[in-house]
Amino acid sequence: MSISAPKMTIKRHLPWPLRVIFLAVAIGLGGAIAMWAYDLGRNFAGLNPNSVRDQVDALSSQVKKLGAERDQFSSTAIAAESQLNIERSAQVQLGNQIKTLEAENAKLKEDLSFFQSLLPTNIGAQGITIQRLKAEIVQPNQVHYQLLAMQGEKIPREFVGNLQLSVTVLQNGKSEVVNFPAQNATDLALYKLSFKYYQRVEGILTLPEGVVIKAIQARVLDRGQMRAQQSVNL
């Protein structure tokens, strides 16, 4: 008979401080490898923090530049619009002034034509005259009139008198005459005349509704006596 025994293995055991140090080194080395692999992957994917930061800074500068240009263009547009409004307002004012001057010029030309037509015949003439009575129907029952009363004396004195207007109308098939100013009228001052050389008179006469205006006659009265008259048909 023989004696058999199991095989025995002899293992060397490291002291625990060495095992702790070895484990720490292994963990540190693994962490370093993992960080290196993470950075390598980010760089490969284009996610480098420095590159992204540079791109963000560049985009921020671009946004600021565009914002400044927008503000500059906006200020320029506002100033241009304000200048345009000023020029438009000035143009409107000039247009109104031109219209006013044209109206005054037309009136002066009309006066000049009056005087030019009167000078050859009325120099040295005595008394009061009515020149170029004009009338125009502006409404069915309204007529606009204008005339020039003149004094032709060589040494004129101040003339004070009254203007009387008579309008011939058809009403209900009958011819009638409407006088202005009417008796007991409140607008007598509108028909007063006071001048040394001439006086322009114009106005609008309002007649009863339904009448048909046919003619108008103007008379200059001096203390109730007629000094001049002129008529015009409409």
Image (spheres, rainbow, N blue to C red):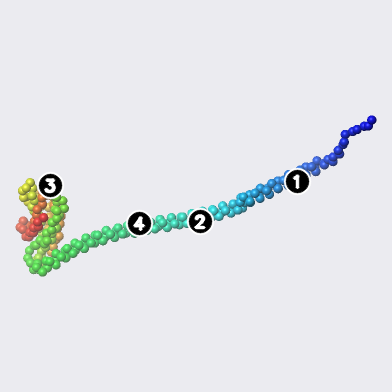
Residue matched to label 1: 25
Residue matched to label 3: 209
User: Could you classify mark 4 by the number of other residues whose Cα lies within 10 Å: few (under 14), some (14-19), or many (20 or more)?
Assistant: few
Q: Which of 37 and 171 lies nearest the eye of the viewer?
A: 37
- Which of disc 4 and disc 2 is earlier in sequence? 2
Three-letter residue code for mark 3: Glu
Residue matched to label 2: 65
- Which of disc 4 and disc 3 is earlier in sequence? 4
Label 3: state its secondary structure.
loop
Between marks 4 and 1, how big is the CA–CA gap? 81 Å
In this view, the mark in front (4 or 1): 1
Label 4: state its secondary structure.
helix
Three-letter residue code for mark 2: Lys
In this view, the mark in front (1 or 3): 1
User: Could you classify mark 3 by the number of other residues whose Cα lies within 10 Å: few (under 14), some (14-19), or many (20 or more)?
Assistant: few
At horizontal 48% and vertical 54% (from top left) the residue drawn is: 67
Give x and y (percent) for residue 122.
9, 67
Between marks 3 and 4, how big is the CA–CA gap? 48 Å
Q: How many marks?
A: 4
Between marks 2 and 4, how big is the CA–CA gap? 30 Å
Between marks 1 and 2, how big is the CA–CA gap? 52 Å
Give x and y (percent) for residue 179.
8, 52
Residue matched to label 4: 85
- Which of disc 3 and disc 1 is earlier in sequence? 1
- Which of disc 2 and disc 1 is earlier in sequence? 1
- Which of disc 1 and disc 4 is earlier in sequence? 1
* Residue 65 in the figure: left or right of residue 193: right
User: Could you classify mark 2 by the number of other residues whose Cα lies within 10 Å: few (under 14), some (14-19), or many (20 or more)?
Assistant: few
